[in-house]
Image: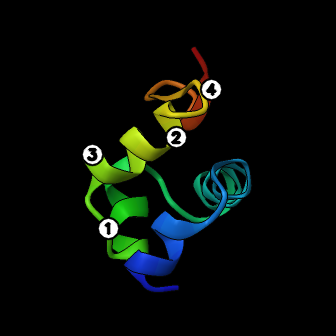
Amino acid sequence: MDASYVLNLEASILLGIVNEKLRLECHSLEDLALTFGVEQSLLSRRLETIGYHYDVISNQFKAI
């Protein structure tokens, strides 16, 4: 997936994809951002629009 595609997905769909990748493949938000080729801040801001933030301890995006 390229960066523009990732950031243009519906936020709730993006959330599901991102959390699955974090659970199964990526060990950190930094690793995930590199996998998708996007900046961590852009990804985080996109998911904040639906009320989710990255939790380092669980390595998942969780509801605020």
**Left or right of residue 59, residue 10 in this image:** right
Q: CA distance from mark 1 to mark 3?
A: 9 Å
Residue contact at pointers 1 and 3, CB within 8 angstroms: no
Q: Residue tagged by mark 1? A: 38
Q: Mark 4 or mark 2: which comes first in sequence? A: 2
Measured along the vertical axis of the image, is residue 37 above or below residue 27?
below
Identified by mark 2, the residue type is: Leu
Comparing labels 4 and 2, the label whose residue is closer to the camera: 2
Q: Residue at x 47, y 53 (%)?
A: 27
The location of residue 50, given as percent across then percent down, is 60, 32
Counting residues from the start of the chain, the first of labels 2 and 3 encountered is 3
Considering only order in the chain, which callout, 2 or 1, is on the residue closer to the N terminus? 1
The residue carrying mark 3 is 41
- Say whether marks 2 and 3 touch (CB < 8 Å): no
Q: Give the residue at the far bottom of this rendering.
A: 1
- Quarter holding the C terminus is top right
What residue does disc 4 label?
Answer: 62
Mark number for residue 47? 2
Measured Cα–Cα span from mark 2 to mark 3 = 10 Å
39 or 31: nearer the eye? Answer: 39
Q: Of the two numbered discs 1 and 4 on the same chain, state the one appearing first in sequence.
A: 1
